[in-house]
Amino acid sequence: MATSKPSISASFVYETMEETLDIKPQGEKLFIGIPREIAFQENRIALTPDAVGVLVANGNHVSVEHKAGEGSNYTDQDYAEAGAKIVYEKAEIYKAPVLVKSAPPVEEDLPFLQMNQTIISPIHLSALKKHHIETMMAKRITALSFENFKDDSGTYPIVRSMSEIAGSAVMLIAGQYLSSFNKGKGVLLGGISGIPPTKVVIVGAGIVGEFATRNALALGASVKVFDNNVTRLKQLQNNLGQRIWTSVLEPRILAKQLKTCEVAVGALSNEFGRAPVVVSEEMVAAMRPGSIIIDVAIDRGGCFETSELTSHENPTFLKHGVIHYCVPNIPSGFARTASQAISNILMPLILEVSDEGGLEEMVWHNFNLREGIYLFKGALTDIYISQKFDLKFTDLNLLIASRR
């Protein structure tokens, strides 16, 4: 049977379709709530009165819970004068569509969370509980974590600021506990003519290590830095602009240096999971009595075998005659400086979110921000959390693309 030729009807016309462009939506004014933190040792507040003033001047609404700024020495009056509304009911503050917190949502916060809320806060992976995430998923929450979002230069700005504060604080703490009044050895950190400088050993050449080194050198101490990442050690020397004593983590060399030092700082951490333990109890037992260990990595388990969690109220304990300072969240002890540092990063970000028409719109255009989103409308978009708790993972890029 012969096949008939295809025929084209004269009435049928091909037309090009109209091109559709991704047009930026109009800006959206945000309603922001800042709750008072009840989490353990959290004195910081994520937005200072000055930052609130800028947000309000740009047409956004900000509510602040009564006494939320107390830990950072900001009064309700400071916030009221900046244009914020002071709220006395916890349930009321949690009705805000956007919550900005300086601590992760804790057990007591969960019943107050609203459907489809946006939360900007830290995540504290090590202390995270499965049912917290499940509750937030059920309430279809979009959550951005301080620790994971990047800025345009590809760095983690809030983590960097907090690490700078912790590193700078380390030497102030060491100086305090080396004094005779704190049952320390009674030595000054250095810089006195005719007296050999105090020895400081720093394990970890990241940002904490760099700022601890800067401050130790400024005080006149002799500094030795250990890290297994040689590139990081090179970077440290370049940033300091001078050659200092560095070494890879070789146990014999490390043990020898710890034996004669007055201050040992633990600043090693993995990007995810527990910090590596590189100093054994045996090494600590060989240290001089009255010397001090400051384990900044205690937030992730600590890198000294003898480290145990302490608090700002009881910050130290003695083991093998060595003072151990193992307070997590050191920046919270310098809450006002830390609040200003967080606020300086969040305020421009929130202004941008407002201009873009909300966080969900901004995520579409801003790839760096995507790194920090761990919940998107209730879908878990962080692979590490999904593996840790065996929860369903959804790729954020696919989610966003499917909504267009």
Image (cartoon, grey):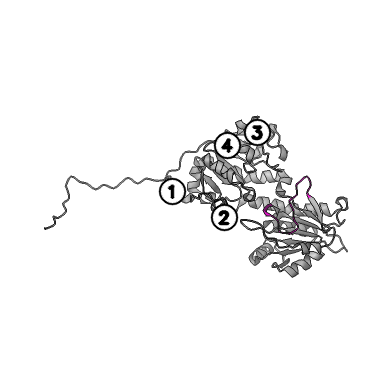
The answer to whether residue 217 is above or below residue 144 is: below
Please report contact status of discs 4 and 3: CB closer than 8 Å, yes or no: no
For image coordinates 16% across by 53% down, the residue present is 6
- Is 312 contained in the magenta span? yes
Instruction: Examine the residues drawn in magenta and state their main secondary structure.
Output: loop
| Number of marks in the rendered image | 4
Q: Earlier in the sequence, mark 1 or mark 2?
A: 2
* Mark 3 and mark 2: Cα distance apart in space: 34 Å
Residues rendered magenta in the picture: 299-315
SS at circle 2: loop
The circle drawn on residue 113 is 4
The circle drawn on residue 154 is 2
**Relative depth, front residue between 85 and 193:** 85
The circle drawn on residue 401 is 1
| Residue lying farthest to the left in this orientation | 1
Q: Earlier in the sequence, mark 4 or mark 2?
A: 4
SS at circle 3: strand
Q: Earlier in the sequence, mark 4 or mark 3?
A: 3
**Relative depth, front residue between 200 and 183:** 183
* Mark 1 and mark 4: Cα distance apart in space: 27 Å
Q: Amino acid at mark 4?
A: Leu
**Relative depth, front residue between 207 and 23:** 207
* Mark 1 and mark 2: Cα distance apart in space: 23 Å
